[in-house]
Image: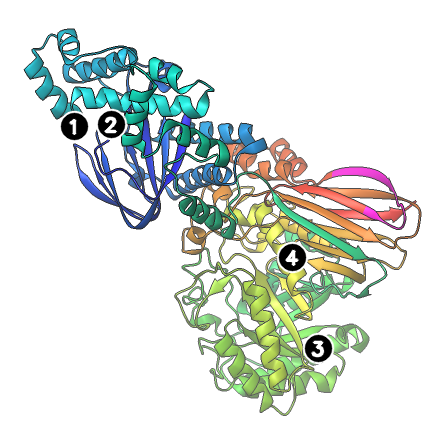
Amino acid sequence: MIDIKILSHFPSDEKIHTDVVLIFVFRGAVALTTPEQCRLLKKGEIYIVNSNTPYSIDIRDEGILCLLYIQYKRLCRILGVSDICFENKMSGWSRIEIKEFDDLLNGIISIYVHHIGKERCLFEAAKWKLLDFLIEHCAKEQEGDREKSTQSFLVQYVQKNYMNEVTVQQAAEAVHMSESAFYRYFKKTFGVSFMQYVNQTRMEAAAEMLVKTGKSALEIALDCGFANASVLGRNFKNHFGCTPKEYRRKYMESGQYPEEEEMSWNYVKDFMEKEGIDGRKALAVKARADVREKRVFVNVWNQAVNIGPARYVLLTKVQEHILMLHKELKFKYIRLWNIFSTRMFFRKSHQTTQLNYQYVDDVLDFCVKNHIYPLIDLGNRPETVPGSEKDLYKDVRQDMGSSHVIFQSLEEWYAIVGGFVEHIVTRYGNSEVAHWIFELWQDMSGNDFYGIQGYFTVLDSVIRLIKDKIPEAKVGGGGWGGEKQFVEGCQGILKMKNRPDFISLYLYLIHRDDMQDTNVRQYYEKDYMKNILENWTGIMKSMGLEKIKLYVTEWNLSIENHNYFNDSCGKAAMMLNVMIECMFSLDMGCYFSGTDRTLSDYDSIGILDGNLGLISKAGLKKPSWYALKFMGKMGNFLIDRNKNYLITADEDGNYQILITNFKNFSLDYSAGFSENLSVREMDYIYDNDDAMNLVLTLTHLPESQYILKKYSFGKEARQCLSTYDILKKKTILDQDDIELLKYILTPQVSVDIQKCSEGILSLHETMEANSFCFVEIAKI
């Protein structure tokens, strides 16, 4: 149905095919001439030449072409139409359609240049998928008219008669024209004379027979309308530059058409391999780990989680979600801020006496009662979270107003914070509050009373003030997110009398020059978080600050609410990669955020709104929840790790394995196409959708039988968003709908028993793109 050729040279004479020809410029440029236009096709561009349309090609700048020949007559029969053409309207495709087409075309080319072999069925299936795409997006049935009818009749006439002796006179009579009128009409319509067209049709038929049949040269000559093999050979060499025998031998030896050059073929093959494009197979990952080689592993990711402004803890639903986070994900700390804000009714105006601790006590009582420690940011932070990346760091205090400026002077600050410290020591006791963590966020907008320059003076005083009353409490600050601020922050800390216990960072997949930069966008660089943490720990070491702990008190792979990526398996798989790669570069990672209940706004009215929390408003545990849950189940001894897996052991001799087939963002998504994406578009925001074949071999295990329990998130969980997309068409979603989504968002569990032979146990997993799993291995 579809033939493919890769060429770096193309005959300069005008061509006309009964096939539909798709031209793809792989390298360089191509000057294409048709009766309708002359245009220059550049690298990456495509053009479709319809059946029986004359065209010529001039390859420039060391160009390489990929040509796909679609059998026109067979296509018409399949579709049940008499005539069909393809429109070149690719400029109107959406980025999703462009990505889908690129994946289909690259898959076909990849299989082709790697030599088809056993992948013949896969190759044919890939070509049918591409054809289906082109029919859906480009094809239209031709409207019948007299001119088109005559042209179509002549094409069919030649196809039926080229194997016989055919003359201009016979053809002219068939369309009721004189020979001279017919000659002028045919030359004008097809760009070549009638006999040139017949001969070209015969040449193409002969070439196809040479590579697809075992017929002799004489048989092919007679079947194609030539008097004998010598006439075929002479015409064939003039047309293709080689004899029929040479043409067939080259195809049989290489799988390439003789007009294809080895250099062009190899260039495309090398390019495909370099870019990781392979339509034939999944990514192969093999590893061998000795269970005797292990070191202590401290899980830095399940210690703390962001909740938000303290007032939200007064809400019953938020308390329910906090308890879920504490009990199931084992978070010891919840991060809170704005504990002194006017919304906590703490005091009137800026008075420092007659303070109302009622709501502050309610929040902290809840924490103490449930054995949860607060991580309190004492800074004057914004109450809201940006709805999209365009809102990030714009003027995040615009909703707070002047009446919400908490402190106006250093004296007021000392009085309030000093009184608060005395209050919590008296109410809860030193043994309790010694576990608490206190942070002071630096407002880079300079809106706080102390401004940017006075921050380190205030931080120095806060450390002394808290340490005087609670020596064992952890006190630190920063909240920096850019390298410039981090370096300046470290320089400021060096001048302080009282060193902080930790430096806090905010880590998001975003790019900006500094915290005041409003030109913020999603970042696409691979290993970005890993590289930036390694860079910053190196800076601390170079400044002699390596003994100070590094807390990432906010981290997330997204920077916006209302993005379905936040509810997807792809995010969870990517989170696991980040946690595995960065686990030794920080001392605490505090995920932002624990629940969508504290992130709601006027647009958050659904069950899944694409917000940043681990738990949806309706109580759905998102895939990101399970990423952290699985990380929390890892043992306390590290055996081996890789960007796709983590292997640990516990004190009881059990083993735990985390596996993730994560995918990085595509360049389009990173370039700013992340907003307002539909559920359907979620599959196209990644750089590829390759599966992964993983073989993990554990060695030197005690001889025994082992039970393997696997919890998987893959295809079933990914259907949650598409199911929700259908359900939300209902006016009101009921509890049954919520329960259905909860069921879909539950890991698939499987159990197996393996016998360890000679101390070796092997695990074979085929992982779909954006899937992840957790495996527990226990001796029976």
Q: Which residue is label 4 attached to?
A: 643
Identify residue for label 3.
474
Q: Which mark is residue 191?
A: 1
Q: Which of marks 2 and 4 is in front?
A: 2
Mark 4 and mark 1 lie on one chain; the one further toward the N terminus is 1
Gap in Å between the C-alphas at discs 2 and 3?
79 Å
Judge by depth and name the residue closer to the eye, 427 or 167.
167
Of label 2 and label 3, which has the lower sequence position?
2
Residue 751 falls within the magenta-colored stretch? yes
- The residues tagged by marks 2 and 4 sit, at their Cα atoms, a distance apart of 52 Å
**Residue at 24% over, 17% down:** 155
Query: Which region shows up in magenta?
Result: 749-761
Residue sitting at the far front:
230
Say if mark 2 contacts mark 1, CB within 8 Å: yes
Q: Is residue 111 above or below residue 572?
A: above
Residue that badge 2 annotates? 16
Q: Nearer the viewer, residue 101 or 570?
A: 101
Quadrant containing the C terminus in the rendered view: top right
- How packed mark 4 is, by other alpha carbons closer than 10 Å (few <14, some 14-19, many 20 or more), is some
